[in-house]
Amino acid sequence: MPWGIGVIGAGPGVAALHLPTLQRLSDRFTVVHLADQGSGRAVELAHRVDAASSTGTEELLADAAVEVLAICSPPSEHAVQILEAINGGVRGILCEKPLATTKDDARAVVDACREAGVKLLVATNHFYDEAWDRAKHHLVALESDVRTISATVALPPNGRFHAVVTEPDASGPPARGGPDLADPAVAADVVRQLVLGLAVHDLPAIRDLAPDFEGVDFAAAVPPIGYTVAFRASGVRVLLTAVMLPDGPDPLWRLTIGTETDRVDVEFPPSFVHAGSATVRVRVGDLRTTTYRREDEDGYVREWRALAALLDGSATMEYHEVLDDALFAIDLADAAAAAIRAGGSS
């Protein structure tokens, strides 16, 4: 029997990604309940998949048909909702990134999942994209000495990230006309949230190659919405750049790994579409370039397949890896914010 899925959140990511993905995997999962936070969108989405709907988490977690929970709410709510789900008796959780926004919360939820035996997967779809497996296989097979990594992102505006920069501090009034990025405190808060909400897509893959975070060399907020962060991990130089422009270029999301001889480019499809896997191009030392065939399945599908494998026991639940990914991202976000408050460098 398919696992019964409850979904907390009814935004674009649920409508455009998770529901279509779960319909493709109907032999493994079936959506039985959706909940919003009062927007009313859950009713419409639930109608599409013949599921129940409600507001808040209480009714959803009391639904006996909900065996697995997808947490697609704002990042500040993830940790609390994971703990609520464990207390509600779910068997597995797929949590949108980030897992948590503080290290204490990350440790608490991973410890609670481990103690309860709840399977936990963070939806970092780039890491689960088959193209990343292919790129890593190339690097490992050749015993490549990774020297540099860059993640370059150019996207159209996104409503959630626009909210981040227009309301950088939930305790104060929203800024009018955008944040004052000349104010180091405001810029630091914006970049911290963007690292945990946007850069986090690529951080598990980066940590796969450079696991030990060492420090930030430079960080800055890029107007109108974006960041530049240069840091070191395991002796590798890493550069993250992102910008969202209303009239900017076509969407671009590229992860580039430089070795002593090769360059590996992994170019991901635009967010919120099912367009197959990323494209991998390898340029070797003699400047020959190989472009690998793309696969039909994208990272969104494969992350749900990975959760199914955890639930049926065909894959091992590695709680320490989930926690280490979360701590790496939070350490980076905190260090980038600290560098901006100090004038841009640590």
Image: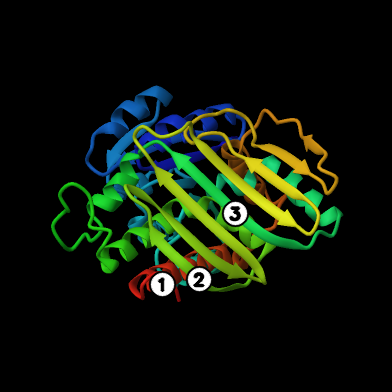
Q: Residue at x 50, y 28 (%)?
A: 20
**Please, what secondary structure does the residue beneath circle 1 have?**
helix
Whole-percent x, y for residue 64 in the image: 42, 44
Mark 1 = which residue? 339
In the rendered structure, are the residues bearing label 2 and label 1 in contact, judged by CB atoms less than 8 Å apart? Answer: yes
Q: Mark 3: few, some, or many residues within 10 Å (few <14, many ≥20)?
A: some
Does label 2 or label 1 sit earlier along the sequence?
2
Does label 3 or label 2 sit earlier along the sequence?
3
- Which mark, residue 150? 3
Mark 2 = which residue? 216
Whole-percent x, y for residue 297 in the image: 65, 32
Q: Residue at x 31, y 26 (%)?
A: 44
Between the residue at mark 3 and the residue at mark 1, the CA separation in whole angstroms equals 19 Å
Whole-percent x, y for residue 102 in the image: 40, 69
Is residue 102 positioned above or below 205 on the image?
below
Q: Mark 1: few, some, or many residues within 10 Å (few <14, many ≥20)?
A: many
Residue 159 appears in the rendering: yes
In the image, what residue type sits under mark 2? Val
Q: Residue at x 76, y 44 (%)?
A: 134
Between the residue at mark 2 and the residue at mark 1, the CA separation in whole angstroms equals 7 Å
Q: Residue at x 40, y 61 (%)?
A: 220
